Image (cartoon, coloured by chain):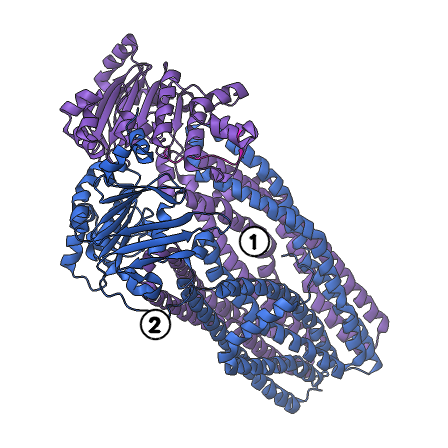
Chain colours: A blue, B purple
């Protein structure tokens, strides 16, 4: 691609580079060995043209071949051939091992880092971005930095070595080569500069066409429903027409680099051949030396081209590395304090006192929230969207931490309990159903690894999913695809409920747990829920008011505050916001 | 492949010229060692400086001609590739738009998108490289071989042995590594998927305290990847050293053989230099060829994937041809009589014993649905998840075709009506509210191409969207982001409804499209709709009893069967399924009100 201007390393880049080196540190012996091997292989393979030249000099003409000397040279050549091949292979192999292992180390470390990132980070950063850091960026950076370094090293060494050999052969030819090669850089950078604008246009148009394709094909059904096929394809072919023009020119210009450098190479070759031949006639250069000089002249430009390519790649790699480290440096959640207690089996008393919280610190959300829920009680939270229903759950589970005030379970501040034991006491079903791409069995047993087959089936039956699971070809062994694969939203929700049924902790959180299940099935599940909730403290968020009528305590939230609380009948009698909400449901 | 050649046929000249010029360039490159040999043998040996300079001039000339040849070649191949890319893109996009819902379901939109973008890019790059290199590399390899023959029959034998051996190594390694690299790619995809899954499931994973086991799973997959990478790396690391060794060995042989020939006076020094030069040219080209083959195999795989889409049949464009009509008549058999009656009685829309399944092997989603609808009637459809509500209404615009029975619009089987005509009579508000990037006005014009601002305002008003649009203060020029991301779910739904209303459809389908509205807005919407749709048939799907209870008739579906049809009161008394649904949402008093 376009070779942009090579920019100098700045302070930031240097820091990144140092950090990368730290990861390589444990492989430093291998890296040293690889550098040594690469030096060896370069020296030896570059020596071969000299040997060929010498051999050529041993065969001057008819009856003038010095076979003994020739055999000596050939033997030496064989040794160099095998030795350089061996060291080259070993070097390649070692480079592979180092780079793949560094990638693995960083990737694993990054993954465990993600496990302790606060949910506020995960909620506010698109998953695709994080994924591309873990996958693409790390790959880019290993390709660029590790392999790039080794290529850079070999390239520089080759240039140096070639120059030394050339100078030994003939200083005049060496100088000729040294002065002519910059031409090829000039040509390459000239082409890159003039095609840069084309490339930018091309990538802009590519972006435009991709976005358009995404939008139209992603919603193809709607396009067809409105019979907009013609308009859609017309607009596409317009963009496509433009793209095609630019991409033709961009491809053409970028493909000029090779012929141009080849041409300059041929130029150098011709000049070296010509001058060499003249020197040879004058008797200052043998034919063998000329042939060695010629083969150096062809080889000489190649590492230069490689190095320019490597340097662009190095810059990309540095950018990738800094993206990787950025994620690595994200502050994680505070570890549990040393004196954090275990909460073995909670009775289920929950106290929320004077809690202030908001996601965006410039806006207010929960303000001075105080509620007390007795063990075994069911608390239903209702209110319009965005009123803070789910927020309460985020705080209870310590996905987020309160800004002020405190939450207590069994009269102990949850910040003084280990997160693990706190979460062990909560069972949760959320509106967004998340299932692992594993078998149905593993999914149901997600909360209880050692569950027996009977327990799993029992839980599935309670959640009304046994029958549809059995209808599947492989039953409980069916492996789910990404995001639940072909299951319907309702079925996924049922599986999430089964997952909870298997492991029933003393406190439950049901956040729109049945929103995608039709009301009749829900009714059946409700019985199971009722049994499940007996003796357990439960928090229910629902927008279907019918599901919350029986709660012990209804909390009506609006704009981050609890504006009403009480039982269903009490609230209806009160004639406030709840009554309005409730009645609008049946108004027609 | 055929399709590709079809495109290239239109640009025959450049398609042929590109590789031709490449070969010309290669030809000139092949002359270079000969010229050098001449320089050494005639110039140096005889001390002829002017000959040397002349030959130097020839070299420069060759370089210049080579450059201009390759410029032409690059230009032609870039042009041909861009042409192929453009046409392929247009045709594929067009073809995708002609696919029916069943095909769209089967393929999935993300597949379609990658085929449209990265696959076609890959093919474009492939065409470009093939035109440039596919002829050139073999040409140089064989050219060098033939040149060697010209110099010396005996020395050429070394080439005859070296070329197949080298090819064997290069292509053997290629063959060994390619499937392994593909496996590595698959493993990387797995890791990517599990990372994404982990991010999306952070809450559940933490709630179940499974962080550590997730890490272990990840580590295992990651280990496997590294192992696979190192393994394939070990093989591909062989490529350079082995080929170099082979070439150098061949050169050593040449030197030995050459020395004997020189000694006998059959060859000169210059010939030896030329021979060794040819040998190294071969290596460079074989490696290029190997890279090209990797690229080609990728492009070929992409081509296969693109073709897969082209092979999908286009949507049934009605049964407009006579044969189709006959077939249709046969299929309906005696029911022609019924159609006549429907025409006579001016029944607006009729379902007659309609059954439907998504594929031949699948079970029926709808079974024997019969229903006649008058103009101005509102039909509420209610039923559990998977009862077939959406499937039923999707049959009306022929997104899917009935499996048996028929649907008739004014006594005409809808399969006899051209698709576009049929769909223009229908306004659909899909379950998922989709808007497109652009202004509000542009979005509204999807419903009616030449809608005036007045009409749009009216539609917005009925859809209860006018208040929030006015609140934003930008009127109809309000910019809507992709997928309508700058609007709330309820706002999007209302705009989608307005869009469908704009064309004043004879049939309006609302597929659970008020689910994100609060109850008050929902009610206001329904009463406004009633006014607006006096002359249309309205299908109203909902999970809420409250939304459908005031419909003229309610169709209750259970497992694809009709489980009741009639007014709310009647159904509540007579349909056990409906009663159960009602009681799950309302108290007895409310339901009986």
Instruction: Say whether residue A482 is visible.
Output: no
For this rendering, which residue is in front, A472 or B412? A472
Separation of disc 2 and disc 1 at Cα? 68 Å
Asked whether the residues under marks 2 and 1 belong to the same chain, the reply is no
Name the magenta segment's main secondary structure.
loop
Residue B529 in the magenta stretch? The answer is no
Classed neighbour count for the residue bearing mark 2: other residues with Cα under 10 Å, few (<14), some (14–19), many (≥20): few
Which quadrant of the figure has residue B539?
top left
Image height check: is A266 above or below A576? below
- Residue at 18% x, 56% y is A456
Residue ID at (57%, 84%):
A78
Based on the displayed image, in which of its 4 quarters is residue A63 positioned? bottom right
- Residue under numbered circle 1: B130
Q: Nearer the viewer, residue B246 or A442?
A: A442
Above or below, comparing residue A86 to residue A538 in the picture: below
Question: Relative to A201, is A24 on the left or the right?
Answer: left
Q: Secondary structure at mark 1?
A: helix
Q: Residues within 10 Å of mark 1 (few under 14, many from 20)?
A: many
Q: Which segment is the magenta one?
A: B431-440
* Image mark for residue A339: 2
């Amino acid at each position: 691609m376009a070779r942009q201007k090579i920019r100098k390393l700045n302070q930031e880049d240097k820091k990144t580079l140092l950090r990368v080196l730290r990861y390589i540190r444990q492989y430093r012996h291998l890296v040293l060995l690889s550098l040594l091997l690469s030096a060896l292989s370069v020296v030896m393979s570059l020596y071969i043209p000299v040997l060929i030249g010498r051999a050529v000099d041993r065969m001057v003409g008819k009856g003038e071949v010095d076979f003994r000397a020739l055999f000596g040279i050939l033997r030496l050549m064989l040794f160099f051939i095998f030795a350089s091949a061996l060291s080259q292979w070993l070097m390649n192999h070692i480079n592979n091992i180092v780079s793949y292992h560094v990638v693995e180390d960083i990737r694993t470390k990054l993954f465990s880092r993600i496990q302790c990132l606060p949910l506020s980070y995960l909620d506010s950063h698109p998953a695709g971005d994080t994924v591309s850091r873990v996958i693409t960026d790390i790959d880019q950076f290993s390709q660029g930095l590790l392999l790039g370094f080794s290529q850079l090293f070999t390239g520089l060494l080759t240039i140096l070595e070639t120059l030394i050999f050339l100078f030994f052969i003939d200083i005049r030819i060496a100088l000729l080569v040294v002065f002519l090669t910059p031409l090829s850089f000039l040509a390459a950078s000239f082409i890159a500069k003039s095609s840069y604008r084309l490339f930018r246009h091309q990538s802009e148009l590519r972006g435009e066409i991709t976005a358009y394709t995404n939008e139209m094909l992603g919603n193809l059904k709607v396009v067809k429903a409105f019979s907009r096929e013609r308009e859609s394809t017309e607009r596409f072919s317009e963009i496509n027409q433009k793209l095609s023009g630019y991409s033709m020119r961009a491809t053409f210009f970028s493909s000029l680099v090779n012929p141009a450098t080849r041409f300059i190479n041929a130029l150098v070759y011709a000049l070296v051949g010509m001058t060499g031949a003249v020197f040879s006639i004058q008797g200052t250069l043998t034919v063998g030396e000329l042939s060695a000089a010629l083969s150096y002249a062809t080889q000489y430009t190649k590492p230069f081209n490689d190095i320019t390519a490597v340097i662009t790649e190095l810059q990309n790699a540095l950018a990738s590395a800094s993206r990787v480290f950025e994620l690595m440096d994200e502050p994680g959640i505070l570890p549990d304090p040393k004196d954090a207690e275990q909460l073995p089996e909670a009775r289920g008393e929950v106290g929320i006192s004077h809690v202030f919280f908001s996601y965006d610190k410039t806006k207010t959300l929960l303000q001075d929230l105080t509620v007390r829920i007795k063990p075994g009680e069911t608390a239903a939270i209702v209110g319009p969207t965005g009123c803070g229903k789910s927020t309460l759950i985020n705080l209870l589970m310590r996905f987020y931490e309160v800004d002020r005030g405190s939450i207590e379970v069994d009269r102990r501040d949850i910040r003084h309990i280990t997160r693990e034991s706190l979460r062990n006491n909560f069972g949760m079903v959320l509106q967004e159903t998340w299932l692992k791409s594993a078998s149905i069995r593993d999914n149901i047993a997600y909360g209880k690894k050692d569950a027996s087959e009977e327990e799993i089936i029992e839980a599935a039956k309670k959640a009304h999913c046994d029958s549809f699971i059995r209808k599947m070809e492989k039953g409980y062994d069916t492996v789910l695809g990404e995001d639940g694969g072909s299951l319907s939203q309702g079925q996924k929700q049922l599986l999430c409920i089964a997952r909870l049924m298997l492991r029933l902790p003393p406190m439950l959180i049901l956040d729109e747990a049945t929103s995608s299940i039709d009301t009749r099935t829900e009714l059946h599940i409700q019985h199971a829920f009722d049994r499940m909730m007996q003796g357990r403290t439960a928090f229910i968020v629902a927008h279907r008011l019918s599901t919350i009528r029986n709660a012990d305590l209804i909390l009506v939230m609006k704009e981050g505050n609890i504006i009403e609380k009480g039982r269903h009948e009490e609230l209806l009698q009160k004639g406030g916001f709840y009554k309005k909400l409730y009645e609008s449901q049946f108004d027609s | 492949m055929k399709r590709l050649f079809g495109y290239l046929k239109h640009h025959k000249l450049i398609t042929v010229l590109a590789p031709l010029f490449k070969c010309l360039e290669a030809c000139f490159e092949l002359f270079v060692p000969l010229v050098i040999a001449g320089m050494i043998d005639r110039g140096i040996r005889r001390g002829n400086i002017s000959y040397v300079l002349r030959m130097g001039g020839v070299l420069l000339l060759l370089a210049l001609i080579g450059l201009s040849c390759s410029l032409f070649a690059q230009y032609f191949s870039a042009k041909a590739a861009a042409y192929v890319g453009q046409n392929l893109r247009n045709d594929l996009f067009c073809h995708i738009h002609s696919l029916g819902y069943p095909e769209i379901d089967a393929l999935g939109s993300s597949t379609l998108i990658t085929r449209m973008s990265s696959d076609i890019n890959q093919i474009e790059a492939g065409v470009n490289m093939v035109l440039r290199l596919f002829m050139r590399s073999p040409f140089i390899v064989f050219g060098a071989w033939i040149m060697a023959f010209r110099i010396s029959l005996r020395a050429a034998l070394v080439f005859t042995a070296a070329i197949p051996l080298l090819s064997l190594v290069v292509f053997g390694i290629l063959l060994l590594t390619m499937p392994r690299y593909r496996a590595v790619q698959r493993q990387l995809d797995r890791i990517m998927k599990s990372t994404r899954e982990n991010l999306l499931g952070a809450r559940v994973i933490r709630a179940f305290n499974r962080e550590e086991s997730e890490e272990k799973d990840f580590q295992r997959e990651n280990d496997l990847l590294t192992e696979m990478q190192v393994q394939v790396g070990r093989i591909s690391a062989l490529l350079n050293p082995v080929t170099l060794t082979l070439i150098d060995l061949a050169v050593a042989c040449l030197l030995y053989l050459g020395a004997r020939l020189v000694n006998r006076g059959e060859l000169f020094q210059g010939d030896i230099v030329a021979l060794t030069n040819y040998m190294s040219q071969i290596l460079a080209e074989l490696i290029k060829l190997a890279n090209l083959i990797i690229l080609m195999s990728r492009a070929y795989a992409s081509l296969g994937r693109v073709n897969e889409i082209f092979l999908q049949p286009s949507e049934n464009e009605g049964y407009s041809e006579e044969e189709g009509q006959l077939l249709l008549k046969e299929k309906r058999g005696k029911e022609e009589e019924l159609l006549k009656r429907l025409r006579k009685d001016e029944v607006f829309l009729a379902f007659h014993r309609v059954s439907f399944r998504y594929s031949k092997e699948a079970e029926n989603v709808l079974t024997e649905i019969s229903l006649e609808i008058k103009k101005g009637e509102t039909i509420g459809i209610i039923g559990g998840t998977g009862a077939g509500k959406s499937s039923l209404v999707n049959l009306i615009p022929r997104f899917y075709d009935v499996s048996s029975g028929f649907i008739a619009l004014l006594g005409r089987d809808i399969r006899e009506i051209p698709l576009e005509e049929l769909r223009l009579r229908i306004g659909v508000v899909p379950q998922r509210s989709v808007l497109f990037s652009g202004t509000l006005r542009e979005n509204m014009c999807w419903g009616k191409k030449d809608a005036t601002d007045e009409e749009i305002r009216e539609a917005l008003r009925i859809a209860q969207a006018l208040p929030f649009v006015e609140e934003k203060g930008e009127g109809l020029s309000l910019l809507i982001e992709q997928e309508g991301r700058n609007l709330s779910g309820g706002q999007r739904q209302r705009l989608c409804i307005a869009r469908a209303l704009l064309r004043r459809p004879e049939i309006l389908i609302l597929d659970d499209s008020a689910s994100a509205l609060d109850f008050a807005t929902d009610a206001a919407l329904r009463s406004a709709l009633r006014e607006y749709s006096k002359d249309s048939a309205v299908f109203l799907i909902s999970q809420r009893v409250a939304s459908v209870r005031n419909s003229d008739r309610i169709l209750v579906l259970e497992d694809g069967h009709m489980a009741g049809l009639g007014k709310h009161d009647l159904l509540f008394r007579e349909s056990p399924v409906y009663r159960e649904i009602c009681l799950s949402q309302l108290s007895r008093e409310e339901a009986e009100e």
